[in-house]
Image: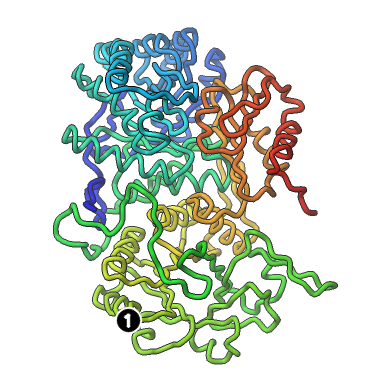
Amino acid sequence: MLQPYCPSLTAYKRLQTKEVKIGDLLLGNGNPIRIQTMTTTDTMDTAATVAQTIRCIEAGAELVRITAPSKKEAENLLVIKNELRRQGYTTPLVADIHFTPNAAEIAARLIEKVRVNPGNYVDKKKFDLIEYTDAQYEEEIDRIRERFTPLVRICKEYGTAMRIGTNHGSLSDRIMSRYGDTAIGMVESAMEFLRIARYENYHQTILSMKSSNPQVMVQAYRLLIQKMDEEFGECYPLHLGVTEAGDGEDGRIKSAIGIGTLLEDGIGDTIRVSLTEDPEFEIPVCRDIVKRYSGRETHEPIQPLNTPERIALPYSPFEYKRRITTEVENIGGSQVPVVVADLSKTSKIAPGDLRAIGYSYDEPSDKWNISDGAADYIYTGGSLPDFALPGTLRVICDEAAWTLTDKKQHYPLLDSRQYLNSQYEQLHFVLADAGDEWTTLLQVAAKAQEDRNVVLCIKSSNRHAMPSVRRLITELMQQQVKCPVILTVSSIDQTVDEQLIHLATEAGGLLLDGMGDGIWLKNEAAHLQNAQVSGRTYLEVTNNEQFLNNTAFSVLQATRTRISKTEYISCPSCGRTLFDLQETTALIRSATSHLKGVKIAIMGCIVNGPGEMADADFGYVGSGPGKITLYKSKEVVKRNVPSEIAVAELIQLLKDNEAWIEPTV
């Protein structure tokens, strides 16, 4: 398959996009990657919205979005804008529009940018499967053109920018009937609106393809770039984001995987991290993501796949298919990716040290309790545990130490040069650096092609690390080398936030493309600082081994490659939200976090649910002040449940559908 979605897979180059002017802010066309967020206050509460907008601006937001669900909120945007200008703030504002074209047309005359969602701007989603003839489909497009064109003309007249923002969960019935619940359906939903804008010779347009599933999100952006290039010969700026990412570590990891995977390939002109937290707390995360690409152009060259920039790939970047590998013990083949915990910095490993990686020893019964988030392997370096290990846990150690073991549950780790001069008949691991001399790597690949017992642990010393690892794995695929690969990522960043972003991006981006049969995360714990904003610690690490182990399992969960816990799809709140999202999310999480594999969506209003819940199993959606509607998949089960009893009713719904198990103490 030809690689058609980014400037280069081996050199860091920004995707060339059209330049869009938003007030005094220039976006696209090589301008800096812009950072933005969205307020959570009631838009009619001018003082609160102004105050929160100022906090966001002072935290570093270059654009601030405010919801305008009806005409009155749209009109009040001018009051908010004037007060901000009076106080000396000139940051552009964006009106967030969903079901109300008349509100969009008002807002477009008053502020710098409007965002419309093509899934619900004209269409209404009823979850009906309707078979459209080609003629009926064209009639629907004509109806969209008639309703959308006035907004385009207003934006053109007033110099207002526009984002056409597709959301995976709010595709219209019309799109769903023809394309299904797919990434290409997301692309076509936006392209219909973009074609209308281009027909009117209006080009101040930004596009987004948001999903709560990073895999779908990444595929949709790649397809959109391909489609724009094929149809127009040019690309419009792209706004990146994982919608309903959630809170805490999981929200940051999911956002980093989706956004970072694209930024690694030079894709993206503005980003927003959608966390179920106060909006000003999103900004430091955005800044940590973006700063990774400052000066990236100076990285050491990666061995090119071949001369042309558009090259033949042995995999499709538009759909998930795991790389075919040989099964070696419990690694590769159809096995879920393994987790390697690094305990090499623990001088003498004791049974208590394994608690941080999911194993707790009960002395009276002489038994190990093993959690769903228990590591499969530990790396001990040159030392060895001197106690009986849990039966499911295996040890990787340096070759010199391995020679001293009884070999049971122990496996040697070699570097590339040791490997080229050795022969093993049992499982062995090779740590290969994708930034190493290419001739050496080709020799390792050639030997691994015939070796049925080797697992490659691939890291990279190249600054453009993830693409260099991808380059090496692509070479393995082209050479039909089918040994399993463990993705080995190290971070020396200073804060918890930075390390989460680094580890999640560089491992997660590869897992999304089906590359990786395991994950081994490492860091410099001495460098690690608890992240703070405005004096508040919002991510805290007390045990480094536990932090790395939890991060590894969270990355696998976010990429849907290994499910080990409950998944929460939680919207970031806005002025439409009908209950305290942060408090409610914490309450639901505390009651349901033991339900492995269950996906629960927590949505503040009908705009973000049921549509935005996408593939959630159960949904908790605000339907009015103090009222909650409960869903099973996309079907309403109970309406207008008082919020005081709604969590208990959700638990009962889980029980009724045999999705509940009693928590263990």
| Image quarter in which the C terminus is found | bottom right
Q: Position of residue 163 (x, y in %)?
A: 34, 26
State the image coordinates of residue 258 (x, y, percent, origin top left): 42, 45
Front residue of this view, candidates 579 and 496? 579
Going by the image, does 13 lie left or right of 219? left
Question: Between residues 359 and 191, which one lies in front from this camera angle?
Answer: 191
The residue sitting at 22% across, 32% down in the picture is 18
Judge from the rendering whether residue 170 lies leftward or rightward of residue 545; answer left or right.
left
Q: Residue at x 73, y 42 (%)?
A: 591
In the depicted structure, whether residue 90 falls above or below residue 620: above
Residue 98 vs residue 534: left or right?
Answer: left
Whether residue 42 is situated above or below residue 611 in the rendered picture: above
Please tell me which residue is depicted at 14% across the width and 56% down the height of the picture: 308
Q: Residues within 10 Å of mark 1 (few under 14, many from 20)?
A: some
Could you tell me the amino acid type at mark 1? Lys
One can see residue 211 in this view: yes
Q: Quadrant of residue 643?
A: top right
Can residue 23 be seen in the rendering of this structure? no
| Residue 131 rendering spot, x and y as whole percentages | 38, 24
Q: Nearer the viewer, residue 166 or 583?
A: 166
The spot of residue 664 in percent (x, y) is 78, 53
Would you name the residue on which mark 1 appears? 447
